Amino acid sequence: MQSNRKISLRALAGSLMLATSMLAVTASAHEQTKTELYKPGVSYAAGSGKPTEGERPPLYQGLGDLTMPITTKSKEAQAYFDQGLRLTWGFNHAEARRSFQEAQRLDPECAMCYWGEAFVLGPNINDAMHEEAKAPARDAIQRAEALKAGVGGKEQALIEALAKRYGANPAASRPPLDRAWAEAMGNLAKAYPDDANILVFYADALMNLQPWDYWEADGLTPKGQGGEIVAALERALEIDPKHPAAAHLYIHAVEASADPSRAEAVADRLRGSMPAAGHLVHMPAHIYARVGRHADSIAVNRDAIAADEAFLAQSGEAASALYRFGYYPHNVHYLLVSAQMAGVRDDVIGSAEKLATITSDDVSQKLAWVQAIKAAPFSAHAQFSDPDTILALPSPGDRFPFVKGYWHYARSVALAFKGDLEAASSEAEAIEQLIDKADMSSLEEQYLPAKDVLGIAKFVVEARIAQARRDYVEAERHLNEAIRLQDGISYMEPSYWYYPVRQTLGAVLLQQGRAEEAIAAFEKALQESPRNGWALWGLLKAQTAGNRDTTDTKAAFAQAWLGDERLLSLGRL
């Protein structure tokens, strides 16, 4: 996948560059270099802002042993506080709140039990502060303040620091409050440099000042407080190499950098350490996918899906909409794209079919990154299904033009394979109509470069049509336009466009007998998407045609490709 580059919009993915004049929409100005992955400022009220009632939460098994000793007269309250902390760092915020509330019930005099609730109601790197969370967050921190005389100096300092995050004025602007919290935690990190939990809270506070935007466009230079974030997390990991929160945030902090491999060992230690926390089970995949460990990414996402399904079955209505319809489908999406790279058709199609049943139109309407998940099954079918299966897929309707563009894309690919090039061209024209006329501003406001991504789809299918006509010069021209767009997209996890278009360019070059140029295209594709089985197969064919040594490529392909080699052809790359 890609490291940060020049981009245009920001999204739960990234953004794009200047497009070709052939697409009026994508020819709009891309004036700034943005490096943010996406905009988390569009909050979705996912249940974490409302008091919970009914059955007490269980003490879950399989959440590891992370602890933060607090002042309490109840061992059970300490257990629920620790569980709340573990769930918080597993980004299961609504369930974490339930645990903190249960800790309060068990020990109403526990100041830090209220502190935990106040913390989890705040913003995080994936979600802004919910309007309905403001009052309960202030109430919780005020209860903690009222009880702080009964706790030690470190806990008092944490309470005083968090109080700065929630002002007395409900209408107060968030950024100054978030900066005050980060500054206070910076002071605490200096006062307690050997406390891994405090270092993690400090890093998290800094990350929330610039969520998903930690590196300059070169992927090498820390942006803003990026250097301090990485340093704080590395110090926490020195103190406690298995600290799950430090590992989680460190993966997020470096995954978009030019050297995501620096977090491989951290990802390996996190793997399996909290087997019931689905999001943390999944998190190593953010590094595994970046470095081409697709088999490992497949494995951890299978486990994450199982963990989330067990949690959702147990928690029922208590589970937040964001977790049920966001984080859980994200794991399925990740399994799908990792399996795509490795050629594991059963996982690809199985995940595509599952996504069609577990995504929510309501959440997709509000969150751009969830809408991207909703679109993924169509690219999966385009790559792995036979044309008749693709053409039988029902229309997703008009509510989500971005998703419908992917449907048209899959249909055009299928029709080109069948040789019905006129119908394939009609589907390409339908994509262009969406680019020109559909309102996707809500996606672009969240930095999903929807029209540019659909521009890639349009150029790719036009190349497929030209390829079917054996007009390889025309196919090459369309692919170069798609590549210009793709090169403008910043890092996204998973990438908004599902494969490196240079792999198709390599195939078209090879079809023209231009083996050396094809080799260069495939090698570049593999820089963008390491150990991608499709590109490795193409490179092997190009090296063979160019009378190059294929020993290393054969070995790499044998390790990377986990599927049926009969799927592979130059026309499908």
Image (tube, rainbow, N blue to C red):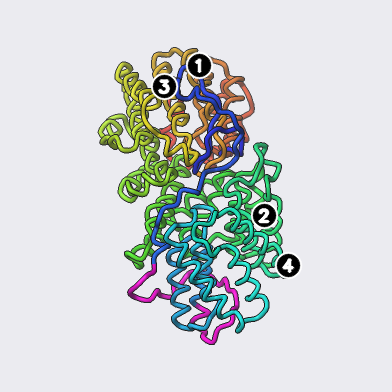
Mark 3 residue element:
helix
Mark 3 or mark 4: whose residue is earlier in sequence: 4
Spatial CA span between label 1 and label 2: 43 Å
Report the quarter where the N terminus lies.
Answer: top right
Q: Position of residue 147 (x, y in %)?
A: 56, 80
Residue sitting at x 61%, y 58%: 205
CB atoms of marks 1 and 3 within 8 Å: no
Mark 2 residue element:
helix
Mark 1 or mark 3: whose residue is earlier in sequence: 3
Spatial CA span between label 2 and label 4: 14 Å
Left or right, 537 with reference to 181: left
Q: Dot 2: few (<14), some (14–19), or many (≥20) neighbours within 10 Å? A: many
Q: Which mark is residue 304?
A: none
Left or right, 154 with reference to 426: right
* Main secondary structure type of the part rendered in magenta: loop
What residue range appears in magenta?
A: 51-79
Q: Which mark is residue 477?
A: 1
Q: Which residue lies furthest to the bottom in this view?
A: 73
Q: Mark 2 points at which residue?
A: 229
Q: Name the residue under label 3.
A: 464
Q: Name the residue under label 4.
A: 193
